[in-house]
Amino acid sequence: MPIDWFTVIAQIINFLILVWLLKRFLYRPILDGIDAREHKIASVLSNAETQKKHAENLEAQYKEKLTNIDAERSTIIELAKAEAHKATLAALQDAKAQADALSIKRTNALNTEIQMLQNEVIDKSVKEVFALSHKVISELADLQLQDKMFDKLLSHLKALNEAQHHELCLAIKKNQGQATVRSIAPLSQPQCEHLKACLEDILTDQPSQRATEQTGGDSLTITLNLEVDPQLIAGLALSFGGWKLSWSANEMLSALQYEVALSIDAQYEENRANMPAHNEHHSLSANR
């Protein structure tokens, strides 16, 4: 059977046209759809990868933040513990200081009260001793004792130094020779004469001539005004206005009592001054 080349060629052409038509209208849309789907899938995968990486980054950041938060929390907790410990120590020290101050205050108050009681007891005892001494001397005092005290007064007059001698001369002149003599019993006439003679000798004594010159050089008459004073117990008191010389048991007891009172007061002040130093030393020892 002979080949119909025209038909063959026509069939080939038809086939090619069919292939082109299929490719143009059938395969191309399918291929384009496949390509579009592939691009879409690739885009989705790419987005998924990007999101995955972003999620991983976020996870890493969150983990880092959690780590930092844990570290900060630990630091804050440690700082809080340190501050709490510090505040506790400060509160304890403050409470201890207040307790020590209160203890020192109470101790000082107690020591002061004890010292005051001791001073009251001592003062009362001293007063009782002096009262008893006053009573005993009063009972033992007699004219013979007064005579001895009178002699002692004359000795004191004769033993005056130059300044005292000068003051006495001025006092005699200022008081115009009027002397006041106090004693527990009136002086005898011989005693009055001896006292006047002693005073006149003082006015005319050569070592005190300057005092005599200051009195004007006139002769003064010594007048003795006698007074009885039982409070003297034993002894005498001679005075020219504001000038005074006495020698009596009462004055000696009063002077001694005054000195004892000063000694007690000085000891009390010394004890008070030593109390803070003692308490401070005690506080330092306790702190160690």
Image (tube, helix red, strand yellow):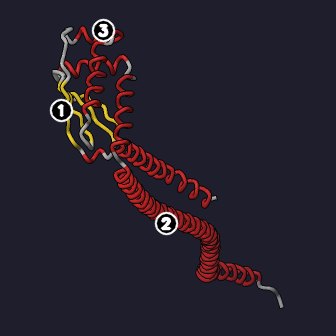
Q: Residue at x 38, y 51 (%)?
A: 140
- What numbered label is drawn on residue 225? 1
- Residue at the farthest left position: 176
Quarter in which the N terminus is drawn: bottom right
Q: Residue at x 63, y 74 (%)?
A: 52
Please state which amino acid type lies under the numbered disc 1.
Asn
Q: Nearer the viewer, mark 3 or mark 2?
A: 3
Q: Residues within 10 Å of mark 3 (few under 14, many from 20)?
A: some
User: If you read the primary sequence from the N terminus, does the residue marked by circle 1 or circle 2 appear first?
Assistant: 2
The picture places residue 170, in percent across and down from the top left corner, at: 23, 18
The picture places residue 221, in percent across and down from the top left corner, at: 18, 19
- What numbered label is drawn on residue 99? 2
Dot 3 corresponds to which residue? 209
Q: Nearer the viewer, mark 1 or mark 3?
A: 1
In 3D space, how far apart are the residues under numbered discs 1 and 3 (Cα atoms)? 26 Å
In 3D space, how far apart are the residues under numbered discs 3 and 2 (Cα atoms)? 74 Å
The picture places residue 213, in percent across and down from the top left corner, at: 24, 8
Please tell me whether mark 1 sits on a helix, a strand or a loop: strand
Q: Residues within 10 Å of mark 2 (few under 14, many from 20)?
A: few
Residue 252 seen by the camera? yes
Please state which amino acid type lies under the numbered disc 3.
Gln
Please state which amino acid type lies under the numbered disc 2.
Ala
Quarter in which the C terminus is drawn: bottom right
Nearer to me, 77 or 122: 122
Q: Residue at x 37, y 42 (%)?
A: 144
Q: Nearer the viewer, mark 1 or mark 2?
A: 1
Q: Is residue 123 left or right of residue 224?
A: right
Q: Relative to 114, does residue 203 appear above or below in the rendering?
A: above
In 3D space, how far apart are the residues under numbered discs 1 and 2 (Cα atoms)? 69 Å
